[in-house]
Amino acid sequence: MKDNSKLVFTFILLGVLSACDSEQPHSAQLQSKRAPAFELNEHKTAGGMTHKRLFASYLYPGEKLSSKQQLDFWTGFSFFRDPWVAAPSATGNRDGLGPLFNTRSCIACHTAGSRAKIDEAGHILPLSLVVRLGSTDPSIKAVDPIYGGQIQPRAISYRLTDANIIKKSPYTDNLGEAWLDKSYSKITGVFADGEPYELLKPSYQLTKLAYGELAPHIGLSVRLAPNIFGMGLLNAIKTDDLLKQEDSDDIDGNGISAKYNRVPNVITQAIEVGRFGFKSKQPNLHQQVAAAFRDDIGITNSSFVDETCSKTQVACNYASAYGGHSLADLEIPDNRLDLTVTFNELLGVPPARNLNNKTVQAGRATFYQLSCQQCHTPSYVTDENYPVKELAKQTIWPYTDLALHDMGEGLADGVYEFNANGREWRTAPLWGIGLQKYKTGQQRFLHDGRARTISEAILWHGGEAEPAKKAYLALTKQQRDALIQFVKAI
């Protein structure tokens, strides 16, 4: 009876998916996709870097670390956790905040190593939400001439007093750049079995722009700070293993066009494959951390030596000079920056939960039947020559290809970042996301946190994922619940 029940489930599911075939141009990919045999190492999502057990947060090192590495991890954690203050101050190893910034510490946006509580709707000075700025015109590569590539809504206090300078500029105070007006409208629909659903569609507008209007070609891309656990292992995946998945022109005709962003390494100036950020803007973990220090907290470093002040923001530039900034005296020296990178690199990943459960295994089968694995690549073996040997040659299960995909008009921001266009987003890793509510008290998904549940996140999928989404809509409630349970378990 046990084997027969599985067979009945498989035929029902294949029948549901086949019903979608007549409507979808790429639906052939959804037919008869059988899940590969279950592997015991799926329980250890991060190989030797899997957490020993479930902790109250994601902020724990992987299991396979030496005592020295654990010491470096917790030292780096102090720079991640502790707030920065304006310079000059008596706190010499924590000063340099601003002059413009989003937040005072890394952990303020990455609660428990995950995502901070999302800013409420209304007229807000955003904290967890970051407003990226980018060109909406592919022929114009430049960022905004005044505000750069990101809105920094907060500023350290500084006022110009030199009369000659004041005559040349209307901006005598160092001011936070803007506020955000955020609202939601509702989108309703029903599954094939009649169960209703509701999605929240966000709308964003900048207000109180302190230094004039944005350039005409500039658009907004609002982001909720992402999960950061397991990033060292993603950094350790061979570039060649990623590029094997690239098919930007859909040569194989399966409807999936994996594409990798090509971005500059700011140290070597080489063009490399992007793998971090919602549009894969950064090529490696070190650059991701260094950019966050400068752009989010205003902490200059050897990778990003200049403040974000533009020429228009005169008081900002003078505030920077007042704080003692110089190329010889960066606000976070390399040894502390490297320790912060080490902390991020050695963050472990929670073990999978309840994978042997019958419902979870049924959901796993559905995951493959819907071809979710074509973008959410289940597993890799990390580079055997990766310089941190504890991260090398590890079998990991992150469920991402780290590639860009057209996700449809519903998720589009219209903003270009290097080779990423306004409809493209990097595939988010799925490992550990089912624990967000347990570890942070809330769960939010997608680039701007609009989805309150995993089901809502699936329903926002469009573009290349439209056939899979429509197949999801056609599932029974039992099948949908099983799929969600699997995603929560991995």
Image (tube, grey):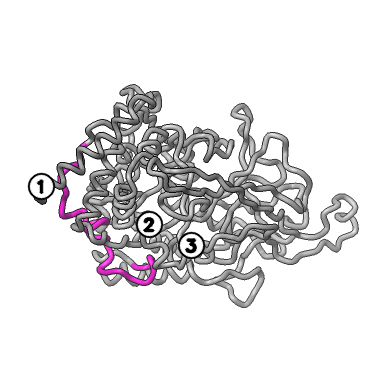
What residue type is disc 1 on? Asp
User: From the image, which quarter does the C terminus lie in?
Assistant: bottom left
What residue type is disc 2 on? Ile
In the image, residue 43 above or below residue 406: below
Q: Looking at the picture, how far across and down is residue 311, in whole percent? A: 74, 47
Residue placed under numbered mark 1 in the picture: 3
Instruction: Choose between 393 and 112: the one closer to the eye.
Output: 112
Q: Secondary structure at mark 3?
A: loop
Task: Specify the quadrant of the image occupied by residue 354.
Answer: bottom left
Q: Earlier in the sequence, mark 1 or mark 3?
A: 1
What residue type is disc 3 on? His
Q: Looking at the picture, how far across and down is residue 208, in whole percent? A: 76, 53
Residue placed under numbered mark 2 in the picture: 433
**Can see residue 220?**
yes
Instruction: Choose between 405 and 51: the one closer to the eye.
Output: 405
Residue at 38% across, 57% down: 433
Judge from the rendering whether residue 179 lies leftward or rightward of residue 10; answer left or right: right
Q: Secondary structure at mark 2?
A: helix
Q: Alpha-carbon distance for marks 2 and 1?
A: 31 Å
Residue at 34% across, 58% down: 432
What range is drawn magenta here?
Answer: 34-60
Q: Secondary structure at mark 1?
A: helix
Task: Between label 1 and label 3, give the one nearer the viewer.
Answer: 1
Residue placed under numbered mark 3 in the picture: 110
Tell me if mark 2 has few (under 14), some (14-19) or many (20+) residues whose alpha carbon lies within 10 angstroms of its own. many
**Can see residue 262?**
no
Tell me if mark 3 has few (under 14), some (14-19) or many (20+) residues whose alpha carbon lies within 10 angstroms of its own. many
> Do residues under tags 3 and 2 come within 8 Å of each other at their CB atoms?
no
Helix, strand or loop for the magenta stretch, by majority: loop
Tell me if mark 1 has few (under 14), some (14-19) or many (20+) residues whose alpha carbon lies within 10 angstroms of its own. few
> Do residues under tags 2 and 1 come within 8 Å of each other at their CB atoms?
no
